[in-house]
Image (cartoon, grey):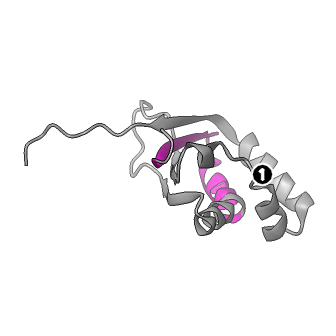
Amino acid sequence: MPGRPVEVAYFYQTKWGHHDEFLELFTRNHLPVLREQMTSGRLLDIRVQVPRFHGDGRAAWDVMVTLVFRDWSAMEDRSDREIVERLFPDHARHGEEERRRFAILDAHWDVPLDAVESTTPR
């Protein structure tokens, strides 16, 4: 819906033994770009979460990043290249680390979310 915030959950499943490396690369190379997008107003909120305990595999994810975009047009805007170029002058190193970040994943998927009004009386 135009004009309304859009929330998207991004799920990452890391290869066994690479969880810490993924978080380090994400925090160093991607989180600063997201924070810049908050400054510009494209993003309204960023949450990075990991499960507290190892489960039985049903969650199938190791890192969940939830972004709240200003609206659908902000979500579809892919103009973060200039932010990357400004924040990371060593483009070759940044590119290598981003390729590595995705190489150590078993899976990655995005889920746009719709809020459901609570029917529980208060």
Q: Which residue is mark 1?
A: 98
Q: At which x and y percent is residue 90? A: 89, 67
Amino acid type indicated by mark 1: Glu
- In the rendered image, residue 94 lying in the magenta stretch gets the answer no
Q: At which x and y percent is residue 5? A: 46, 49
Q: Residue at x 85, y 54 (%)?
A: 95
In the image, 87 versus 99, the foreground residue is: 87
The image quarter containing residue 39 is bottom right
Q: Is residue 105 above or below residue 80?
A: above
- In the rendered image, residue 14 lying in the magenta stretch gets the answer yes
Q: Which residues are magenta?
A: 4-28
Q: Residue at x 15, y 37 (%)?
A: 119
In the image, 28 versus 111, the foreground residue is: 111
Residue at the extreme top: 58
Horizontal side of residue 97 vs 120, given as left or right: right
Pointer 1: residues within 10 angstroms few (<14), some, or many (20+)?
Answer: some
Horizontal side of residue 117 vs 63, given as left or right: left
